Structure formats: structure tokens, C-alpha cells
Image (tube, rainbow, N blue to C red):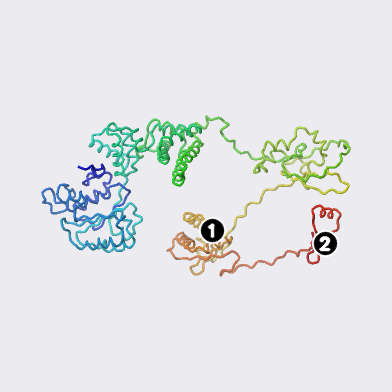
Amino acid sequence: MAYVSLYRKYRPQNFEDVVGQAHVTTTLKNAVSAGRVASGYLFCGTRGTAKTTCARILAKALNCIGPDGANTLPTPEPCGQCGPCRSIAASNFVDVLEMDAASHGKVDDVRDLVASIKFPPMEGRYKVYIIDEAHQLSRDAMDAFLKTLEEPPDRVVFILATTELEKLPITIASRCQVFEFKRGTIAQISQRLSQVLQEEGVAAEPQATALVARAADGSYRDSLSLLEQVLAYKRENVTAHDVSLVLGTVDEDVLAHTVGLLAASDAAGVFELAGSVVASGKDIRQFLKSLSGRLRDMLYLSVGAPVATADGLDDSATVRKQAAQFAPADLLRALEIISDAERESRFNNQHRLLLEMTLLRLVRLPSSPAAVAAEPVARIAPAPVAAPAVKPIAAAPIATTAPVAQPIAPAPTPPRAAAPEAPSPAPQPVLTVEAVAPVLAGSPLDSDLLADELVDDEPEEMDALLPGDDIVDILPGDEQAADEGGDSALPSLFTPSIDIPEEDEEPEDLLHVQTVAVTEPPPPVVPTRPALPPDAHPDLLRLQKAWQEVINRMGTRSPSGAAHVRDASPIAIREKTILLQFTGRFHYERMESSEKGRKALEDIINKTLALEPGTYKIKCTMQGENAGIRATPPEPSKQAPRVIEEAPESPLMDEVIAVFGGRVLDEEGSKGY
């Protein structure tokens, strides 16, 4: 006899054998017993959850005649021995037709099916049509099938199975009794696998069956297929290591070692770990999936959730010990990082680099509060300290090499006799490093270098280089504050100014350092929405209040569309039309030229206002343009006319023109420079 796969060999043959779907099997048995069988059923759920199996069992229950052929009515417990039961199990019963909509979903296939319905059953009591993957029927096929599904002939039952219920139109689902098939839990699948192994006479560790159940991801059929793959490798004393080797899952020891490296923040160790994972031939996505499962178990334990509510939770001593090394917030952030990496792995073929970068991000996560407290102080970043107020202090000369724009170097001149030493200047207010640092915090200058250049340790040499009265120029209005010693906000930024020398002026006087007052930047201007008149439309008032919600909903559909909507404001409602005013022409033109974008925005606005679709349309306008709304005309400009005066003749200006190659322009009869 030919070999039969395990999922076919151990396929349930009656309702009692179906695992995890008691809500479905009980309802079907009661309907058969009471003679209240519907004309249409819709079985939906993930793959491998016994949808087609239950459809076949129902077909048996409707056509079973018993071992002795004495049954004249449907029975909730098909015998499995009569001719109809054996024929249905072998898929050759003439009155039970199975059709795969994935390959027979055209309208012509449905028309052939509808044409065969008019003939009565030939061997059994009922004609049963099982349509698998019903969501893949074409739109025309669904339309052709709709009337027959609504009013089928007597003794005809349709059973539709689908894994994507949302793709079926409501007109199909409303004409059927809908049953939702649940995913199998790890405990249920493990129990079923243990029964199969017992039937096969194979011994296996509980951890081995749990690994197979976890890899099946809720599918009973997939679990039997994976178990068959493992049994092909080893048929006695199956261990968890054997399952990991065959299915490509990650050993518990590797997971424990990985979590230990993350807890120890061992960046070098994760590189070695990534190399060993790649060298072993493990799939990177499978490794990330296994690691996320371990971190999920740790998160479950760290928050103190009941173990009984978790499906397949590993609450061993090792997992509990490692869970105590992380805070729940860190574990949650780690799961988000792994989820992002799994998503990126579908588009990134450099899987080793992706794994290394992901593990490095996980290493940087802080561990538990106790572990953070035990770390060296150097690893903890100091909190930013607010800059102290600037106070006038004793004069401290400023180095000429301050990190500012360099002035134009003057032409060299013959050396002159050293000037007599100037008398010691009176103390002048000077800026401290603490006051300058916050201003230059955004610049690439090094703070230590800035401190060395602004404050010199040898004021005597500076006194010889520059006169004392040229070190700092106090702006007008600050002399009194400096003399009083108050907490005046002295200027904190230096800019050099270049004075064009006169003929009798020495080049040394060209470098003149002065301070420029720095005030607090004005607060950002937040655009305000146009004021509405008291008699504005109520829907307009509601829409303005909920405009941020409109932007958020638009962002879920199109981030670029949300950027355009954020630039607009609803300003009026005229005859079921909402006028939107844009401040930026780019956003206005993009929204005006996109019919699809306007339609999406109209749907969102009507939905936000809890109105029927199509209640309001939108019209885009540009700020300042006439769109049916009276706008306040701008006031005439009161700017004084520009007066161009003739520049006075100056030898210095003539010299500048000669040096830089300038020329005099004549504009409307007046001279200007």
C-alpha cells in the first residue's frame, strides 16, 4: 500500500475527533439531530484548523445510512463504515463535489456548478458542494452564484471555506451561517502530537512536541507535516535538539546565551554570536522569531501576568532569572526593535549585517534598575544643567585667537618703536565660559578649546598686546548695570568688526573686538485659523474642533496627504461644499490636482462628522484669493517713498572703489552706491 502522509492518515473522521472546535461541532451535531440543516454554511479561520474536515464530516452525517443500511435520516455520528461514508472519505462520492476556487473561480466554473444543481441526488440524501478558498471567486462568479445560494433546491447544501473572510462580500456572508474556527493552542497541538506519536510507537520528549507545536503557529495540519519531517530524521527518542536541527529553530541554550549577552551589554560577544548563527546555517528570520518568543516570555513573567493565561509560556528557572535582569519597558522596546528587523529582513539581503546591528541595538538597552545602579558612574550620562546667569566679574583679557571669523589681514608695515606700557586699565566686565557655552552649543567647536582660548592664564602678556580699553566694549545702556554689579544679561557672542583706517592710523588698530547683544529668539509663530462669524454653520464649528483628528486619519492613509491637509483650514460651508483655505501654494496645487486625494479627504471629513458618505464636498482655495468669500482688502501701503541721495564725495570711498574695482551707477538721474 502506498505511503499516506500523517495529516491524511490521522484526519478526523467524526465530530468527536476534531480538536479545539467544540463550538462548531456541537452546533452542527445539534442541527443534524433536529433536522434544521441550513442551505449554506461559511467556515472561516486560519489554515489547518479543520474547516474542510468538518465540511466532509457534515457531508457524511447527512448521507450516512449506517453499517446495516437501516438509517433513513441524517445522523450526528456517521459510522464511517457504510458505502457513502467510505466514498466521501475517499473523495469519490458522486453527490459530494469539492471545488477549489483558487483554480476554478471563473464565472464559467460557477455556471457549470449552478447547472448541475437542478439534478436531484443520485446516491445519497443530500447533494453537498464544498467550495474551498471561496474568497478567490471572481466578482462575476460571486454574482452568478448569489441567487442560487439564496434559494437553492431542496436537499442541496453549500459549504464555503475561506481563510480571508473580509474579502467575501456581505451579500455572500449574509446568506450563510458563519462559523469561526479557532487557532490551535500549543497545549492542544502538543496533546494531539503526543497521541499521534503513541499511535506510531515513537518516544519523544515533551519539549520536542512543544517545539513542533510552536513552529506550527496554530495549524493542526502543519504540526503533523512538521512532525512527519522530524520522524523522517529520527524515529526513536526524539529530543528537542533533533527538532531544532531539522526545523531550523534555535536551541534553548543559544537563546539563554543571547539573552545573557544582552543583559551584560557585551557588544563584542554579540558579534561572535551573530557569526556562529550565520555559520550554523540558521535562517536569520527564524532566529529573530525565536528570540522574540523568548523575550515575550520574559516580559510576561516580569509584569507578573498569570502563567495559566499564556500559551506555551516557558517559565523555567533560567527564564525567570533572566527576566529579573530587565525592566518591562526595556523588554517591550527590545520586541519593537526585533519586529522592525523582521520587517526589514524581507527587503534586505545583507542578513548578517542586519542581525549584528539588531543585536547591537539590543545591547544598548538598559537592564534592570538594580543592574543600572551597580554600573560605573561613567556609563551614566550626566543630566544637562541650566546655564547660570551672567554676572560682571573682574576683567580677564580675551585671547586674540577666539574662534570667530578672521578679519582681513592688513598689509605689513615697517616695525616701529615699542610704545610705552599703558597704565593698568580699570576692571571691566567680561563674559565667563559658562555664559558663552550655551550660545555656541550647536556649533562644532570643542568646549575645552573654547575655554582655553577665551580665558588666558597670563594676563600680563595680553596687556602688552592690546590696550586695556580695547578688550571689551560695553553696549550703550550696559555701563550702569555693570557698575551696579547686578545680574544683567551681558552679551555672549563676539564678532570682529573692521574699521577702514585713515591715512594717519596704524594697522594695529584694525582689529577691534566688540560684543553684540544676543536676545532670546522670538517664539515660533503658530498659524491661527481664520476667525469664524457668530452665525457660522454648526458643522463648520465641529469640523474646526476636530481638524486634528482629520489630519491623523489622513495620515493613516497617506503621510504626504496629511502634510497637505495640515496646511489647510476649513473656513466656510456653502451649499454642502466645505471651503478649505491653504497657506502654501505647493500644498494647494497638489490637493487641487489630485482627485483621489480630495475624494479620500471628503470621506474622512464626513466620517469625522458622523455623516453619510458624500454629504459634503470640498473646494480648495488659496489664501488671499477670491473663492466666493469676501475677504478684507489689504490696507494700502504707507511706506515712505524711497529717496536716493547723492553720496558725498570722500577720499576714503574713492580709495575703496580703486582697491575693489568698483564703479558708480547712475539710477534715474541720481547717483548712488
Q: What amino acid does circle 2 point to?
A: Glu
Quarter of the N terminus within the rendering: top left
Q: Position of residue 544 (x, y in %)?
A: 52, 60
Which one is nearer the viewer's eye here, 470 or 291? 291
Q: Position of residue 305 (x, y in %)?
A: 39, 38
Q: What amino acid does circle 1 point to?
A: His
Q: Which of the two discs, 2 and 1, labels the residue nearer the N terminus?
A: 1
Residue receiving disc 2 = 646
Q: CA distance from mark 2 to mark 1?
A: 50 Å
Circle 2 packing at 10 Å, graded few (<14), some (14-19), many (20+), is few
* 466 left or right of 253 in image: right
Q: Secondary structure at mark 2?
A: loop
Residue receiving disc 1 = 564
* 500 left or right of 532 in image: right
* 588 left or right of 256 in image: right
Q: Position of residue 157 (x, y in %)?
A: 23, 57
Circle 1 packing at 10 Å, graded few (<14), some (14-19), many (20+), is many
Which one is nearer the viewer's eye here, 235 or 19? 235
Residue 241, by quadrant, is: top left
Q: Secondary structure at mark 1?
A: helix
Q: Residue at x 22, y 43 (%)?
A: 2
Quarter of the C terminus within the rendering: bottom right
Q: Judge whether 28 appears above or below 197 on screen.
A: below
Residue 72, by quadrant, is: bottom left
